[in-house]
Image (cartoon, rainbow, N blue to C red):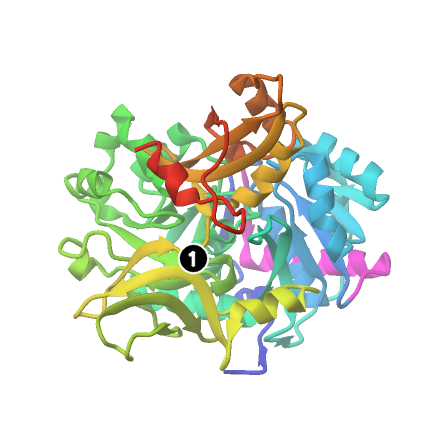
Amino acid sequence: MFDTVPDMACKRAELSGDATAFLDQATDRRWSFAEVNRAADAVAAALAERGIGEGDRIAIACLACAEFFITLFACQKAGIILCPLNWRQPAPELVATMTPVEPCLLIHDAANDDLAERIAVETKIDRVDIETGLHAWIAQGGPPRSAPVPAERPWYLLFTSGTTGRPKAVIQTARMCWANTVNIGQAIGLTSADSAVTFLPLFHTAGINLYTLPVFLNGGRSTILPKFEPETLLELIRAGEVTQFFAVPAIYQAFSLMDAVDKVDWRALRCGCGGAPLPEPLIRFFADRGAMVLNGFGMTETGPTVFLMDAARAADKIGSVGRAQMLTELRLAGVEANAPGEGEIELRGPGITPGYFRNPEATAETFAEGGWLRTGDVGRRDADGYVYIVDRIKDMYISGGENVYPAEVERILNDHPEILEAAVIGIADEKWGEVGAAFVIPRPGTTPDPQKVRQWCRARLAGYKVPARIIAVDDFPRTAAGKTRKPELRETLA
């Protein structure tokens, strides 16, 4: 597609330097595009003074804030690879995640000071807090940087779990960011007049790319909330401060239970949803109030946007994620090109990751010949070319917009002193989309207490990974090779 792209912060500052890029609600600070670019130059210079340069990795653990994006742009300028950390996870889990990528510095905010200290003690890496250290770097300034950015150079890593539950670091590039911006921008008509709100976690592709970076690159404004606060968020929308809005189903569900939902002019807002299918009752709930919530589909590996429903057909294609967008090629395994049918979704294009950092085995396993990404999701294409997600091939389920891999949870459960073996499946949940159900075989002479087992898990896993149900059984249905038949476990809950 292209070998280089312009320095994103620098180019946007050239085009609209005085316009507002970010309104940071926690600090009541307005950042213009020019200020963001100068701050990114300063952070890049400070990192260079520490001997951190191209190809090095630094980690960051923070709630949503403008400084995250300043650091992200600084890394792009310097060729440093940023590694956002999931601050919901306990320190031991994060240390295991970080170990393969070997970051040399941890940047964090005050809210994550204790977590950062535990990580730093365990890993022996230096840490810098945002409120004093990073701001001192910004105040110090640095020489302007405006060199073109290699389009396929690793820019940042987003961590996900593989089928074994082991963390994988998905490479994100400038090329992927531009492709995502094009895919979203042409689909929903992004312009410099648009405003978005950033509140989803910034260790997740949605927090970064839906829609903060596309809005930034189009010259629009993002109001940043540290995290999801339903009353504050709904008030921003009610006040007309948001024109483009993206959320996972659990957030639309939360809104639907609030009295203030009927005080919003939903017709003035363009709404998107991802992470899991938005249930039809919720689609109709918001449609009755003038909002057509458009379902989409993407992955960390796809930048993320590849499918997005269009408003013109949303009402008569409920449940569809739309069609493959401008810079995305789609094929369904075993289905003739462009024909109706069902098969595994495979994707190709400039928005697709080049692979997993320092993990060539996982990269080779994920890509088919010709550069096609195997998504592991089965899709059905109708006669009009609209795609519906049928099911996941693997066992992964999505809870509140977060991927949960049963093998990871099973490993924790199997370490419990009273559990001999565990099997975890995802089950439907009205609030979170899906939650975990854990079937456990007790060790002889023991009777695991479900609440205490959940507490055991919570001490070792992020909250969204903790099974909602713990079910003791004598044994699992198994194949001749001894593998658990999870579909049969699911049937016992029907």
Which residues make up the magenta segment?
A: 28-53
Q: Position of residue 395 (x, y in %)?
A: 46, 49
Of residues 188 and 466, the one drawn nearer to the viewer in this rendering: 466
- Please say whether residue 472 is visible from this viewpoint: yes
Image quadrant in which you'd find residue 4? bottom right
Q: How many marks?
A: 1
Q: Tell me which residue sits at (53%, 66%) in the image.
A: 12
Q: Residue 383, position in %: x, y?
A: 17, 70
Q: Amino acid at mark 1?
A: Gly
Position of 426 compared to 285: left or right? right
User: Mark 1 highlights which residue?
Assistant: 220
Main secondary structure type of the part rendered in magenta: helix
Helix, strand or loop status at disc 1: loop
Residue located 71% across and 36% down the image? 91
Residue 290, position in %: x, y? Answer: 17, 44
**357 falls in the magenta region:** no
Q: Is residue 247 left or right of residue 387?
A: right
